[in-house]
Amino acid sequence: TMLFDCGLRNTIVRLLAPALARGERQTAWLVRRKGHRLLGLAGIVSGIVLLVLASIPQAIAPVASPELAHVIGYALSVLALGAVFDHVSGSYDASLAAVERYDILSIASSLRLVIQATLLVWFVSNGYAIVGCAAAVVIARLVYTLVVRQASRRVYGSDALSLSTEIAP
């Protein structure tokens, strides 16, 4: 899904950090808002592409048996939702990186990995195979998105124009 963001995450950081350093709150707000919208759109596009691939058995059938192609189609359908979460979290990632809150990003990434690993073990041990693995990835991405969204809102304030340098207690 990173292919569909076309470098937008890095661009947001490169535009947002200098605007914040210069105290241009309106510019920073515009960069965050437009970046969020563009990455959301990229997520929707990548989700649609995965759904289209999932709905075309011929796209999967040459490399898999018909039964496996059906299961892979379900997994791609589940991952389509994860693509949207991944792109939405990208704008929050970039916003936090712009103010050098790598500690938050590291904690959120660690939490995502722990949740994903735990769910993978549970889904596979209960016989959900590929679709369960895809669901574990999507659930972990959702949790990650919610964590970085909340952290970003606390750093930037709810109106995105008030900026504090520390996360409020």
Image (tube, helix red, strand yellow):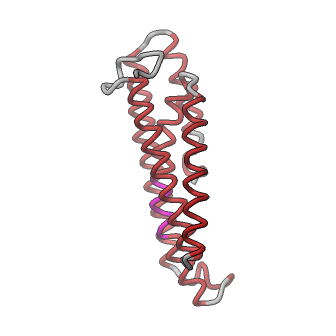
**Residue 100 sits above or below residue 81 on the image:** above
At horizontal 55% and vertical 62% (from top left) the residue drawn is 119
Image quadrant holding the N terminus, namely bottom right
Q: Nearer the viewer, residue 112 or 22?
A: 112
Most frequent secondary structure within the magenta stretch: helix
Image quadrant holding the C terminus, namely top left
At horizontal 61% and vertical 66% (from top left) the residue drawn is 121
The part of the chain drawn in magenta is: 77-84
Seen as rendered, the residue at the extreme bottom is 66
At horizontal 50% and vertical 59% (from top left) the residue drawn is 138
The x, y position of residue 80, in whole percent, is 48, 63
Q: Nearer the viewer, residue 134 or 87?
A: 134
**Residue 156 sits above or below residue 45 on the image:** above
The x, y position of residue 16, in whole percent, is 50, 23
Q: Identify the image quadrant of residue 60.
A: bottom right
Q: Identify the image quadrant of residue 34.
A: top left
Q: Nearer the viewer, residue 38 or 100?
A: 100
**Residue 27 sits above or below residue 66 on the image:** above
- Residue 80 inside the magenta-drawn segment: yes
Seen as rendered, the residue at the extreme top is 22
At horizontal 48% and vertical 58% (from top left) the residue drawn is 139
